[in-house]
Image (cartoon, coloured by chain):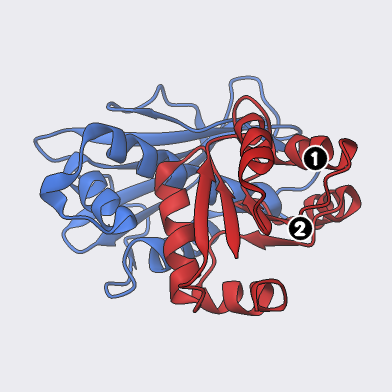
Chain colours: A blue, B red
C-alpha cells in the first residue's frame, strides 16, 4: 500500500482528534506551504527503516506546538515548558509515523523520535499534507533518504 | 488494583492515565516507568495487577521487557499501548504472551472494552 497526502491527512486527523483537539477539526489545505510564525517552527521527526528508508516529519509553528503540548498534558498554556513541547511533538511524530509504517509494504521498523527547532534538511518528499488547525498550519511529510528506496 | 504504565514519553503516560480515568477505572493506583528496564524493577517492587507498555522505547523495548518478565517466571498480565498496530506486531506481541495490543490513537471506549475483563 502506498502513502499519499490524503492518507497522511487522515492519520493526522485521527491522532489530533484523540489527543490534541476534538473540537476543531483539521482542514486539509492541499499542499499549501507551512506558515511559520515569528517564533519559528518545531519539527518532530521519526525515522523509518526498511524497504522504504525515510522519515515522517511533523512541522508546526512554535506557538502551535506549545498549544498542542498544553492540550495533550491538560495544563495551562502558560505552564508549558520546552521539555513538554519536545515530548509532545516527538510523540505526535511517533504516532503518525507508527501508522504510516503500518501502511507501507514490507517489513519496517521505527527509530526513536527526535525534535528540532528548525526545519530538517529536506529529503525527497514522497507525500505531504498541509493542515489548518485554528489559525495554525501544520505540515506532515513522508520523505525518502538520499539513495533510499520507496 | 494497581496499573504500571510504561512509556518514555511523559505526555503519553499522562494521556494513558487520563484515559484510564475516562474509561471508568478511576479507583486504580497507577505507577509509572520510562522504559522496559525500569519497568522490570517496578514490577518487582510494586507488584502491579497489569502492565500497559509502549513498544518503541530507549534502553529496553516493550517486547524485550515482556520477554524478560516471562523468562524470569513472572506472569503479570501485560498489554501494549503503542503507535504500531500491524498484524505482524500483534502476532509478535501475542506470541510473547501479551494479552492485547491497543494502537494509538485510542479512546476511552477502547480502554473500557479491552481492560474491563481484567480490571473489572
Q: Could you classify mark 2 by the number of other residues whose Cα lies within 10 Å: few (under 14), some (14-19), or many (20 or more)?
A: some
Q: Please state if B110 lies on the left or on the right of B16 as rendered.
A: right
* Residue lying at 24% horizontally and 53% vertically, measured from the top left: A70
Are labels 1 and 2 assigned to the same chain?
yes
- Residue situated in front as seen by the camera: B48 or A92: B48
The location of residue B20, given as percent across then percent down, is 50, 68
Q: Specify the quadrant of the image occupied by residue B15.
A: bottom left
Query: Is residue A53 placed above or below B48 in the rendered structure?
Result: above
Q: Quadrant of the C terminus of chain A?
A: top right
In this rendering, does residue B78 appear at all? yes
Q: Nearer the viewer, residue B18 or B76?
A: B76
Q: Which mark is residue B21?
A: none
Chain letter of mark 1 equals B
Q: Residue at x 81, y 51 (%)?
A: B93
Q: Secondary structure at mark 1?
A: helix
- Helix, strand or loop at mark 2: loop
Task: Specify the quadrant of the image occupied by residue B56.
Answer: top right
Please tell me which residue lies in front, A15 or B27: B27
Q: Earlier in the sequence, mark 1 or mark 2?
A: 1
Give me the C-alpha separation between circle 1 and circle 2: 10 Å
Q: Residues within 10 Å of mark 1 (few under 14, many from 20)?
A: many
Vertical comparison of A102 with A91: above or below? below
Q: Residue at x 55, y 79 (%)?
A: B109
Spot occupied by residue A113 in the image (x, y as percentages of width and height): 50, 33
Q: Nearer the viewer, residue B1 or B113?
A: B1
Can you identify the residue that label 2 sits on? B77
Identify residue for label 1. Answer: B69
Q: Chain of mark 2?
A: B
Q: Is residue B119 above or below residue A51?
A: below
Amino acid at each position: 500500500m502506498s502513502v499519499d497526502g490524503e492518507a497522511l491527512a487522515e492519520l493526522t486527523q485521527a491522532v489530533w482528534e484523540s489527543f490534541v483537539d476534538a473540537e476543531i477539526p483539521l482542514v486539509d489545505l492541499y499542499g499549501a506551504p507551512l506558515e511559520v510564525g515569528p517564533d519559528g517552527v518545531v519539527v518532530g521527526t521519526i525515522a523509518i527503516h526498511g524497504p522504504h528508508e525515510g522519515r515522517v516529519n511533523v512541522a508546526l509553528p512554535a506557538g502551535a506546538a506549545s498549544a498542542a503540548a498544553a492540550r495533550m498534558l491538560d495544563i495551562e498554556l502558560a505552564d508549558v515548558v520546552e521539555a513538554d513541547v519536545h515530548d509532545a511533538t516527538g510523540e505526535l511524530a511517533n504516532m503518525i509515523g507508527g501508522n504510516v509504517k503500518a501502511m507501507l509494504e514490507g517489513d519496517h521498523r521505527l527509530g526513536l523520535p527526535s525534535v528540532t527547532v528548525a526545519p530538517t534538511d529536506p529529503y525527497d518528499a514522497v507525500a505531504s499534507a498541509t493542515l489548518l488547525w485554528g489559525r495554525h498550519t501544520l505540515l506532515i511529510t513522508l520523505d525518502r533518504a538520499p539513495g533510499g528506496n520507496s | 488494583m494497581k496499573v504500571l504504565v510504561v512509556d518514555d514519553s511523559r505526555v503519553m503516560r499522562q494521556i494513558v492515565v487520563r484515559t484510564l480515568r475516562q474509561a471508568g477505572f478511576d479507583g486504580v493506583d497507577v505507577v509509572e516507568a520510562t522504559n522496559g528496564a525500569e519497568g522490570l524493577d517496578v514490577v518487582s517492587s510494586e507488584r502491579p495487577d497489569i502492565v500497559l507498555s509502549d513498544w518503541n522505547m530507549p534502553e529496553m523495548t516493550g517486547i524485550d521487557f515482556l520477554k524478560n518478565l516471562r523468562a524470569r517466571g513472572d506472569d503479570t498480565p501485560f498489554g501494549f499501548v503503542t503507535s504500531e498496530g500491524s498484524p505482524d506486531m500483534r502476532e509478535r506481541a501475542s506470541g510473547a504472551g501479551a494479552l492485547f495490543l491497543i494502537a494509538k490513537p485510542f479512546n476511552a471506549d477502547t480502554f473500557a472494552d479491552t481492560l474491563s475483563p481484567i480490571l473489572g
